[in-house]
């Protein structure tokens, strides 16, 4: 199976083992990681990969992992997002105990570290506007320039304090680290580490009007929390020298090591929070938790289980090359879990009545069926059978077609777990639409077995038309018609799949699904895996198809 072809080699764990074996800083230390989301949107499946790596690596080494809201940027952070992030991580089954932090809690210390750098002659106040900064950044062969680089320490200290006190306009001054204007790595060309920004912060209000840049703030956050290994995505690889520079030049209480891994991409979807927000805000989907969204709350509502997502992350492994994983592989992992664990029920999506003409009109029989053939310990339930049952409209054809083994006049078909019946014809309305199918049952085939061993090829699901519940069923397809809707200069909005949601309102389901509490997972026999939607209630049952039965994942 796919388990064998996907190798989950883990260089991160190898690096950590090396660090521990080498002694020095890491000797005797508990492995300590962190997951640092920016609270500006909901978490998606890409974040799940990072979460599994951050929390999972710590777990693996008997260590711990912090949850830290990376809220150094004062725009757009929202309590709604913070709560949702916590909920999603707990749902995946990871715990941060009491180690829940905000980067903004360290603003004071960050400021002090910046002052320390100025005092050491390692940072200076630059008066370039953003445009001037761009014009003077040089190119591969020309170093950057700044006339403010050699400004006396005292002057920078004074200006930086006045920046903090709000004496200057946005965009007129920055604090820059004094590193190397000629570096081949542009991140090292005296990067800006503080900027003026007069947007109030969701936690610190208007206490600050200068904010630290990510590359300066992040290593400090890590160091203050005693992080040993700072695991992040590949786009930060070129920032690592700056990360190390900051740690080496401030009086850091700890020396975290940054290790990068590839970002997860999945085809037929988009993954950036900005684009996902666009889908929500412009009404392309019903919300962040729309079951078509790659967000964790969307996947949860769709019927993904924590185990399936953790398994998926485990199997795709970690690597240093960004790649796009097929959506069908995610589905494959869900199917694996639900095949083991989902309760089986029968539901008819597009019903037509099957009338069994030789069955007594007032009779009802009960059949005891297994809840899950994969797990006999899940027990059995009773389903009822009577003269009229619902079958799928497309399980009947008026004429035999080669390879079609279901209902057509003269053919014998097995009603799953009940009886073998022989189709005798149908009834149609004035438009030629089939309104009922007729059949006769063989009383000697109770349970679905033929006493004489005769072959019956087709087996169909059905629901007792005298004992059922009405349900709405929602079928989903890819959100985008293009496998890579946002690659290059494509506008992902041009590739929205107009048929990504199909709502069936007249479905018939067996009564065993009454009284559902919380999200429950089912296999609707022959149709796929489903779960009750969060808007489902006893008066109005709604089910989402999580994934079809057929495995679209192909071995490469
Ligand atoms: P987005 O582009 O979706 O907004 P982000 O990187 O800005 O993502 P953060 O909230 O900053 O989102 O991410 C928190 C952590 O999750 C970071 O360590 C980041 O590297 C990681 N992460 C985000 N997206 C992915 C992804 N697609 N694959 C793996 N890790 C990811
Ligand atoms: Mg970000």
Image: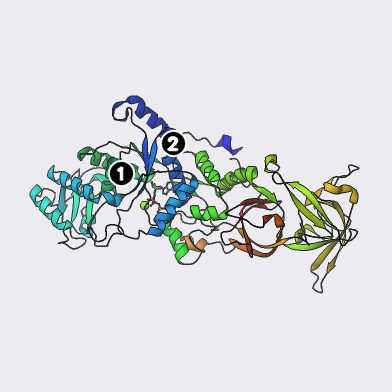
Q: Which mark is residue 239?
A: 1
Q: Which mark is residue 247?
A: none
Q: Position of residue 372 (x, y in %)?
A: 69, 44
Q: Nearer the viewer, residue 180 or 338?
A: 338
Say how the picture is coloured: rainbow
Q: Is residue 402 visible?
A: no
Query: In this rendering, is residue 411 above or below 25?
Result: below
Query: In this rendering, is residue 536 above or below 324?
Result: below
Query: In this rendering, is residue 406 above or below 21?
Result: below
User: Are the residues flagged by discs 1 and 2 in contact, CB closer than 8 Å?
Assistant: no
Q: How many marks?
A: 2
Q: Position of residue 155 (x, y in %)?
A: 9, 52
Tell me the residue that label 2 is attached to.
59
Quadrant in which the C terminus is drawn:
top right
Does residue 34 appear to the left or right of 293 in the view shown?
Answer: left
Q: Position of residue 255 (x, y in %)?
A: 28, 36
Query: In this rendering, is residue 12 above or below 283?
Result: above
The residue sitting at 89% across, 58% down in the picture is: 359
Q: Nearer the viewer, residue 169 or 205?
A: 205
Does residue 404 appear to the left or right of 299 in the view shown?
Answer: right
Instruction: Specify the quadrant of the image occupied by residue 182.
Output: top left
Q: Nearer the viewer, residue 220 or 260?
A: 220
Does the closest atom of ligand 1 sit within 8 Å of the Cβ of label 2? no
Mark 2 surroundings within 10 Å by alpha-carbon count, few (fewer than 14), some (14 through 19), many (20 or more)? some
Q: SS at mark 2?
A: helix
Does the closest atom of ligand 1 sit within 8 Å of the Cβ of label 1? no
The residue sitting at 32% across, 30% down in the picture is: 26
The residue sitting at 74% across, 62% down in the picture is: 351
Does residue 410 appear to the left or right of 314 in the view shown?
Answer: right
Q: Position of residue 44 (x, y in %)?
A: 46, 52
Instruction: Specify the quadrant of the image occupied by residue 130.
Output: bottom left
Q: Is residue 458 visible?
A: yes
């Amino acid at each position: 199976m796919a388990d064998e072809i996907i190798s989950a080699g883990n260089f991160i764990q190898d690096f950590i083992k090396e660090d521990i074996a080498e002694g020095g800083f890491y000797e005797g230390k508990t492995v300590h990681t962190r997951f640092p989301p920016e609270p500006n949107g909901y978490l998606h499946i890409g974040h799940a990969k990072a979460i599994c790596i951050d929390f999972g690596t710590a777990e693996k080494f008997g260590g711990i992992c912090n949850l830290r809201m990376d809220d150094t940027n004062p725009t757009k952070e929202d309590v709604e997002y913070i709560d949702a992030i916590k909920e999603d991580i707990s749902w995946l089954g990871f715990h941060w105990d009491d180690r829940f932090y905000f980067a903004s809690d360290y603003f004071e210390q960050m400021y002090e570290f910046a002052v320390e750098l100025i005092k050491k002659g390692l940072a200076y106040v630059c008066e370039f506007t953003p445009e001037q900064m761009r014009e003077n950044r040089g190119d591969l062969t020309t170093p950057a320039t700044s006339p403010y680089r050699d400004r006396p320490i005292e002057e920078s200290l004074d200006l930086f304090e006045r920046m903090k006190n709000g004496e200057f306009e946005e965009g007129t001054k920055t604090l820059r680290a004094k590193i190397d204007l000629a570096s081949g790595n542009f991140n090292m060309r005296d990067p800006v580490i503080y900027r003026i920004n007069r947007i109030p912060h969701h936690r610190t209000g208007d206490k600050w009007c200068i904010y630290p840049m990510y590359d300066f703030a992040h290593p400090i956050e890590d160091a203050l929390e005693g992080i040993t290994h700072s695991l992040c995505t590949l786009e930060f690889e070129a920032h690592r020298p700056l990360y190390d520079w900051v740690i080496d030049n401030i009086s850091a209480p700890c020396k975290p090591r940054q290790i990068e891994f590839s970002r997860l991409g999945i085809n037929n979807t988009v993954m950036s929070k900005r684009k996902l927000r666009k889908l929500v805000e412009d009404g392309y989907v019903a919300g962040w938790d729309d079951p078509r969204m790659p967000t964790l709350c969307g996947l949860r509502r769709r019927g993904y289980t924590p185990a399936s997502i953790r398994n998926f992350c485990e199997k795709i492994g970690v690597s240093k090359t960004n790649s796009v994983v097929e959506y069908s592989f995610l589905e494959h992992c869900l199917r694996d879990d639900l095949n083991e664990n989902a309760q089986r029920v029968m539901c008819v999506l597009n019903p037509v009545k099957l009338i069994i003409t030789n069955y007594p009109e007032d009779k009802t029989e009960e059949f005891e069926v297994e809840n899950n053939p994969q797990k006999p310990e899940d027990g059995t339930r009773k389903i009822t059978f009577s003269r009229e049952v619902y079958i799928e409209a497309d399980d009947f054809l008026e004429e035999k077609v080669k390879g079609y083994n279901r209902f057509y006049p003269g053919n014998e078909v097995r009603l799953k777990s009940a009886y073998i019946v022989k189709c005798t014809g149908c009834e149609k309305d004035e438009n030629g639409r089939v309104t009922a199918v007729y059949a006769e049952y063989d009383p000697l085939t109770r349970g679905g077995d033929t006493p004489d061993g005769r072959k019956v090829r087709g087996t169909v699901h059905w629901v007792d038309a005298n004992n059922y519940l009405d349900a709405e069923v929602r079928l989903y397809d890819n959100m985008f018609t293009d496998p890579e809707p946002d690659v290059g200069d494509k506008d992902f909005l041009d590739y929205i799949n107009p048929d990504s949601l199909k709502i069936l309102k007249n479905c018939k389901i067996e009564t065993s699904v009454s009284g559902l509490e919380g999200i429950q997972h089912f296999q609707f026999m022959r149709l796929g895996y489903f779960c009750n939607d969060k808007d489902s209630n006893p008066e109005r049952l709604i089910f989402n198809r999580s994934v079809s039965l057929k495995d679209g994942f192909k071995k490469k």
